Amino acid sequence: MRLVTLLLLACALTLLPRAASADVFLSWTDCLGDGGVSDRTSACTSDGGVNRLIAHYTSPSPIANFVAIDATIDLTSEDTAIPEWWAFANAGACRQTAASINIDVNALPNFGASCADTWDGGASATGLFTGYLIGFGGDPNRARAVFAIARGASSPFSLQAGTTYFAFIWQITNGLTSTCAGCATPVAVVLNSLILSPTTGPAVTVDSGEAGSQPCATWQTATPATCIEVPVVPRTWGSVKSLYR
């Protein structure tokens, strides 16, 4: 009788609906489902053009009043230090203005096929490339980039579980490639985590450790072993909102 009970319980569990996946994805040029690729190579012979990294994700559960994303991207160089070519944002950096954030999904070649938009083509939100630390964790060959995107609190968006959503584009131009060394150095770029914030209730963290995630995009065919993931300390919607004051 006990065996029968256990078998019935096992059958009942298999019939329960499975939770939606909670995954993060990072790819070059487009969303992975629309022809985006995990590796990008460059001849490093031109100062013109732009390289686009696309961050996208699925939410594990519906979020009726979603308004903001807090994102973390980690980089690891296969050289002993982050090359000058990847020195962004900070004063005195070789390519200080070469990286920026874009939240207009229409910049993607195949928008609409697999990635849904939550920012109304960028019209209803503000995106910020908020910080870039070279030497993250005490390692000179690593860097961390942080981003924040937020809608107005009075116009939240309803996220559906299991749907793949566009988060943002990290745009990296080829400007000063002829001046700043290191374009040819292999670098791994990992979308470490996305924190999805509602106007009320707890934030939802979607990280690179989920089974279905494809968080690593490589530059100049960096080896998979270079894709290092580091835990991120969550921030609240209040802390993200403060960036826009």
Image: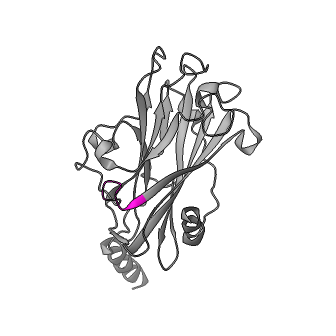
160 w.r.t. 170: above or below: below
Comparing 93 with 71, the one in front is 93
Q: Main secondary structure of the magenta part?
A: loop
Q: Is residue 208 visible?
A: no
Comparing 22 with 145, the one in front is 145
Q: Is residue 215 visible?
A: yes
233 w.r.t. 108: above or below: below
Residue at position x 34%, y 60% from top?
118
Q: Residue furthest right?
A: 138
- Residue 227 lies, in percent from the top left, at 57, 38
Residue 122 in the magenta stretch? The answer is yes
The image quarter in which residue 41 lies: top left
Residue 134 in the magenta stretch? The answer is no
Side (left or right) of 18 relative to 92: left
On the rendered image, what quadrant is the N terminus found in?
A: bottom left
* Residues drawn in magenta: 120-125
On the rendered image, what quadrant is the C terminus found in?
A: bottom right
- Residue 50 lies, in percent from the top left, at 42, 30
Residue at position x 50%, y 24% from top?
220
71 w.r.t. 214: above or below: below
